[in-house]
Image (spheres, grey):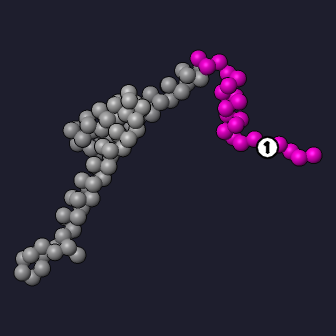
Amino acid sequence: MKKVTRSILQELNSVAASKDNDYLIDATANNIINSSINLFELIYRTYDEDTANELERRFYNSIRSADPRKFKRGMTKIFESRRNNNDQSTGSTDTMGNGTRG
């Protein structure tokens, strides 16, 4: 006889389906809210105020419009800005005083 196995995701889905949706929604929302608070605290510790405000705005807009790409675009701008700043700071000058990249 062949034993039927189920994935963890299937098990979780069956448990979630058998529970009252009100409690599931309450618990999920609570987790998302706490995670969001932690994310904002990290953002405000990591970035300057203008950048943090922009990321917070993008986060809210991403949720409102159900489009995570809006937040991702903001993060991509930060990555590119930091990369450009690092590229500029690693430039060197040759013996003639001309900037070269090394």
- Give the image quarter of residue 17: top right
- Give the image quarter of residue 52: top left
| Residue wearing tag 1 | 5
In the rendered structure, does residue 6 fall within the stretch colored magenta?
A: yes
Q: Is residue 82 left or right of residue 7?
A: left
Q: Residue furthest bottom?
A: 95
Q: Which residues are magenta?
A: 1-22
Vertical side of 44 occupied by 64: above or below: above
- Give the image quarter of residue 36: top left
Q: Is residue 10 left or right of residue 28?
A: right
Q: Nearer the viewer, residue 67 or 6?
A: 67
Vertical side of 98 occupied by 15: above or below: above
Q: Is residue 37 visible?
A: no
Q: Position of residue 47 (x, y in %)?
A: 27, 44
State the SS at label 1: loop
Q: Position of residue 31 (x, y in %)?
A: 50, 29
